[in-house]
Image (cartoon, grey):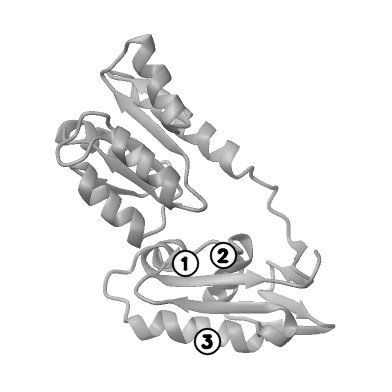
Amino acid sequence: MRIAIADDDKDIVDGLERTLGPAGYPCVRFSNGRDLITALARETFDLVLVDWNMPEQSGMEVVYWARRNLNPCPPIIMMTTRSSGDDVVRGLEAGADDYIIKPETHSVVLARVRSALRRAKPQQPVERFYSTGGFDFDRSTNTVNVRGKDVTLTPKEFALAELFFENRHRPLSRGYILQAVWNSVADLPTRTLDMHVSRVRSKLMLKPEHGFRLQTVFGFGYRFEQFGIEE
């Protein structure tokens, strides 16, 4: 889970990080709209929290760009001092999922973030056993039943497999995967991620002839696709 925050007011971003980070939402910060758009094209985020009035490119321009170019587009919350009814309507009609008028308490912002994330991806109860894509997962033993055979994965391989199956057909950036599986180990060698992906692909037989494709997205990360197999 990762959130992009764009605001040219350092104090506001600092406060949001102090609220969202401990709640389980690591943040990546930006001070202008241009840098945020560049990051959205290269990275994966679960939610974007953006100010309207920013240098380089405005929050409104960010919303327009994201809706046109990202598929799927993460939830976007506009957080701004612009409080007129017309501005609220403009922000929502541009594609923002929510609109927060500053100043607002951090507890309210956290609640609105959680609500937007729930709407985007309803949380399912965490259970020991579950099935998806024709595979049976056992969280207690890190095993996956593949065509009647139990395959044991290491904890990291299991977490990586879960991440891919939960995000089928969604490009995941390398930074997003490292955050989700390795908690953003900054000095983790690139080959470590590639090695784990290769092992998951091999152990679970994620190959086109079996209805799956786990492919490298050059300069970005990975995309896991399933085709020709019903749940």
Q: Which amino acid, by three-letter code, is at mark 1?
A: Val
Q: Mark 1 points at which residue?
A: 181
| Front-lying residue, 68 or 62 | 68
> Percent position (x, y) of residue 227?
71, 71
Residue furthest to the front: 68
Please report the residue visible at 69 percent of the width from the left and 73 percent of the height from the top.
141
Q: First in sequence, mark 2 or 3: give its number.
A: 2
Q: Mark 3 points at which residue?
A: 198
Q: Is mark 2 on a helix, strand or loop?
A: helix
Q: First in sequence, mark 1 or 2: give its number.
A: 2
Q: Residues within 10 Å of mark 3 (few under 14, many from 20)?
A: some
Please report the residue visible at 80 percent of the width from the left and 64 percent of the height from the top.
231
**The quadrant where residue 127 appears:** bottom right
| Front-lying residue, 52 or 18 | 52
> Percent position (x, y) of residue 43?
36, 60
| Label 1 with label 2: CB-CB less than 8 Å | yes
Q: Distance between the residues labelled 1 and 2?
A: 8 Å
Q: Which of marks 1 and 2 is in front?
A: 2
Q: Residues within 10 Å of mark 1 (few under 14, many from 20)?
A: some
Please report the residue visible at 36 percent of the width from the left and 30 percent of the height from the top.
78
Residue 66 got which mark? none
| Front-lying residue, 88 or 122 | 88
> Percent position (x, y) of residue 129?
77, 63
Residue 163 got which mark? 2
Q: Which of marks 1 and 3 is in front?
A: 3
Q: Which amino acid, by three-letter code, is at mark 2?
A: Leu
Is residue 208 in sight in this rendering? yes
Q: How crowded is mark 2: few (under 14 residues within 10 Å), some or many (20 or more)?
A: some
**The quadrant where residue 6 appears:** top left
In the image: residue 2, left or right of residue 82: right
210 vs 60: above or below = below
Please report the residue visible at 27 percent of the width from the left and 31 percent of the height from the top.
51
